Image (cartoon, helix red, strand yellow):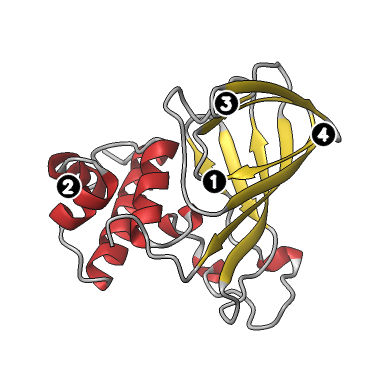
Amino acid sequence: MPLSEDAHLDRLVGSKIRLLRTAQGLSLQELGDGTGLSVGYLSQLERGLSSPSLRVLSLVSATLGVSIGALFPYLPERETEPDGPVMQRDRRPRPIMWRNGITKEILTPGNPASEVNRRLVEIVIEPGGTTGRAPVSGDGEEVGVILGGSLRLTVDGFDYTLREGDGFSFSSSADHTFTNPTDRPVRVLWVNSRDRRRPPPGA
């Protein structure tokens, strides 16, 4: 019986996490120590038997010292990013699809020579889409502007309603969540900056 699209994505994400973990010489226990997740859960995750939440992806990516986007496979023809400072529209990596109604598309190339890992992305949150009840946190800074729709953003326990043209900026270490409580999609231009020199949690 063929796998559903979600189950297939779970397996691909799990395989990518295992590949990144083993490439760094980390055991499941060490990944568990860094993320606070159990070895049993991480084993299921790597085998594609569990669908990770955004919070779980954030913990895993921070521990591995990579962006959340690095945990997702891209289409083969889009795996290689341009060497120069420009990313043409047709060279963008495949949009990242989350089951909670959030799509993320990388708009700019990385700069390996920079000490700061900074990417401009467009995030689309479908009606009812949310990062979940558990807060997300990480390293770096979060900056963005609402391109369309209305977003409910919670930072360190304070709730904000942002509409088209409104912007935000806060430390990634602050507990935060966001939700689209409306019946229209929300588009956000978002930048996350992370210092490459800072070791991931548990290092």
Residue 183 drawn at (x, y percent)? 71, 16
Residue 32 appears in the rendering: yes
Query: Which residue was labeled with disc 4?
Result: 166
> Image quadrant for the C terminus?
bottom left
Residue type, label 4: Asp
Q: Earlier in the sequence, mark 4 or mark 3?
A: 3
Snapshot quadrant of residue 167: top right
Q: Which mark is residue 129?
A: 3
**Residue 28 position in % (x across, y down):** 16, 55
Q: Nearer the viewer, mark 4 or mark 3?
A: 4
Q: Secondary structure at mark 2?
A: helix
Instruction: Give the residue type at disc 1.
Output: Ser
Frontmost of labels 4 and 1 is 1
Looking at the image, which residue is at 17% across and 47% down?
A: 43
Measured along the vertical axis of the image, is residue 94 above or below residue 153? Answer: below
* SS at circle 1: loop
- Which label belongs to residue 172? 1
Circle 1 residues within 10 Å: few <14, some 14–19, many ≥20:
some
Determine which of the numbered discs, if any, sits on residue 43 in the image: 2
Front residue (pair 8, 16)? 16
Q: Determine the residue positioned at 46% across, 47% down.
A: 138
Q: How far is mark 4 from mark 2, CA to CA?
A: 41 Å
